[in-house]
Amino acid sequence: MVKRRVHVAAAAIIREDGHVLLARRPSIVDQGGLWEFPGGKLAPYETGFEALRRELREELGIEIQRAQPLIRVHHEYEDKRILLDVWQVHAFEGEPFGREGQAVRWVPQEELNNYPFPEANHAILRAVCLPHDYLISDEEDDDAVFLGKLERALRDDGVRLVQLRAKSLDEDAYLKRAEQALALCRRYQARLILNGDPALLEHVDADGVHLPSRTLMALEHRPIATGKWLAASTHNPEQLAQAATIGCDFVTFSPLRITPSHPDAAPVGWHDFQQLVETAAMPVFALGGVTRGDIDQARAVGAQGIASIRDLWK
């Protein structure tokens, strides 16, 4: 059976207080009764953004003033292949309501998992809940210096997603630092991701774990509970596919550019990076020679944002 292709534009409308607008699918349609991000199918010759503006005007009675690409999700159902072209709406005119009789609701981000969604929406949920910069900590021998730099990033730069990378520390020293970093991240309502073996979460109740690519490729299934974030380092299409197979929530992909730490690694560049991100089944952070100044470029080609050591860990 040849599956029909469906191209849908969808909106992640997020208020300043972190609430996200959801709409409920009518009971008489496919997957009726489930909640979703508002939007609809593209008409002939429409771009994703043009369709988004039209659909939100027709469905919610609002006019988009400013929006930015968030994520593109390819998903296969039994009877169709769907492409969700998702935009984050930053500003709009009007007060959204269900013009077609559908229920709409503002939902806090931390409660989104309490709502039933179509399967294709799961990657969007991850993207909505993630920031657009991902701090990877640098090697620091002194705990006080480490904590000072971490607090500066959290307090002054507004970092809200941190990976604790400390290859030079032994396990006891790493766990001690992880507890200190976790307390600091909690103070600033940031998430802490541990780098290394998933068993680290048995000792420190961090928000998740980031797998090195070698560990990623050795796994056959997701190694931690779904209530924690699972991330991984990827460098090629095979690793991206493996991350999807074991259910990673997001990944980094590197190197985008040549870096001093890996001068011999061939950079992928923005064009090829865009092709790789298009096929990924989860949010992807660009890593390698990027800075916060590259966030808009990264998002324009489909990434969640950027991950960095040098630019964010000063």
Image (cartoon, grey):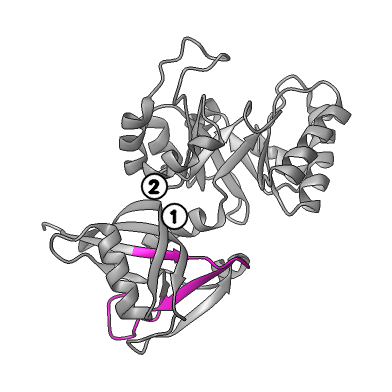
Q: Where is residue 248? Give x, y as percent.
A: 50, 45
Point 45% across, 39% down: residue: 243
Label 2 is placed on what type of residue?
Answer: Ala
Point 28% across, 76% down: residue: 30
Q: Where is residue 191? Give x, y as percent.
A: 68, 49
91 left or right, relative to 310: left
Label 1 is placed on what type of residue?
Answer: Ala
Q: Where is residue 36? Give x, y as percent.
A: 41, 71
Point 45% across, 64% down: residue: 12
Residue at mark 1: 123
Q: Is residue 181 visible?
A: yes
152 left or right, relative to 86: right
Quadrant assignment, res 274: top left
Residue at mark 2: 281
Give the magenta part as a residue range: 10-34
Q: Is residue 77 visible?
A: no
Point 39% across, 47% down: residue: 281
Q: CA distance from mark 2 to mark 1?
A: 7 Å
Report if the CB atoms under discs 2 and 1 are less than 8 Å apart: yes
Q: Quadrant of the C terminus?
A: top right
